[in-house]
Amino acid sequence: MASERVLIVDDDAEVRGMIAEYLATHGYDVRAADSGEAMRVALGQAVPDVVLLDLNLPGEDGLALARYLRERFDVGIIMVTAAGEVVDRIVGLEVGADDYIAKPFDPRELRARVKSVLRRLQDGRASAKPAPGASDRKPVEVGRCTLDLKARRLVDGDGTEVPLTAMEFDLLKAFIDHPNQVLSRDRLLTLTRNREWEPFDRSIDIRITRLRRKVEDDPDNPRTIRTVRGAGYMFVPAGERPRD
């Protein structure tokens, strides 16, 4: 069985070396890059399973690189940074990071997080069963908007493009792939390949609220993305009634 590939993107040579040596001793195929440019070169050689991405990089920072990765590759992303402010973690979630660990850290904890992200990726791929010909589907009506899944574009009724974060798109796709089904927060996190951290146990709720502002005619009384008390959320396609 091939080794799972990990790409380390960090401008600190000592940190890169420490992580690479530790993970390599535990059977991972490890590569390293010291910048966004070097990361792209490494991606051109082999797409990793997980990217360990430093936030505070010179030039393009980790958030910009996380957005680049999420838009183009099906990889796990763990932000590795010295920054500890809550806002950094929230923005990391916004751009689609799967996990977050602050320096200094115990290498054993990092390895545990890598294993967790890999497991979530595998579970998400196994559980997400798109409908036949999903890539060829026509744009889907979502409330007052239309979502083009192939182009990843959300367009309002007047033709105006509505900005979407990677996480918001993943949430909408999860709903569309599972219409009239109650999806719990844990299920949504699995389907979107995101991890729910204890400090952010309402991260899904925050994103649902933002999505409703974009797609609902009346966000305070949502009819498209409905709350099922004590259970989660349900997407109701236009003209359909939810199942009992």
Image: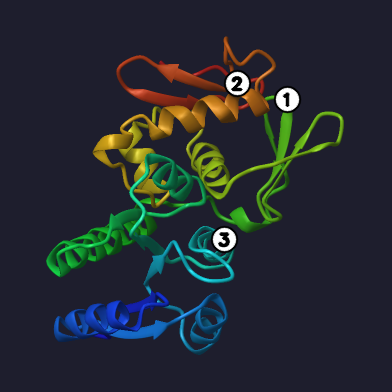
* Dots 2, 1 in contact, CB < 8 A: no
Q: Is residue 53 above or below residue 238?
A: below
Q: From this viewpoint, which residue is outermost toward the top?
A: 221
**Amino acid beneath label 1:** Arg
Mark toward the start of the polypeptide (3 vs 1): 3
> Would you identify the image quadrant in which residue 210 lies?
top right
> Would you identify the image quadrant in which residue 154 lies?
top right
**Image quadrant occupied by the N terminus:** bottom left
For image coordinates 86% across by 36% down, the residue present is 159
Q: Position of residue 198 (x, y in %)?
A: 24, 37
Looking at the image, which is closer to me, 225 or 17? 17
* CA distance separating discs 2 and 1: 15 Å
Residue at numbered disc 2 = 240
Q: Secondary structure at mark 1?
A: loop
* CA distance separating discs 2 and 3: 39 Å
Neighbourhood count class around disc 1 (C-alpha, 10 Å): few under 14, some 14–19, many 20 upward: some
**Amino acid beneath label 3:** Ala
Taking the image as drawn, is residue 243 in sight? no
Q: Nearer the viewer, mark 2 or mark 1?
A: 1
Residue at numbered disc 3 = 64
Describe residue 45's horizontal placement relative to residue 145 as left or right: left
Q: Secondary structure at mark 2?
A: loop
User: Which labelled disc corresponds to residue 144?
Assistant: 1
Q: Nearer the viewer, mark 2 or mark 3?
A: 3
For image coordinates 36% across by 85% down, the residue present is 31
**Image quadrant occupied by the C terminus:** top left
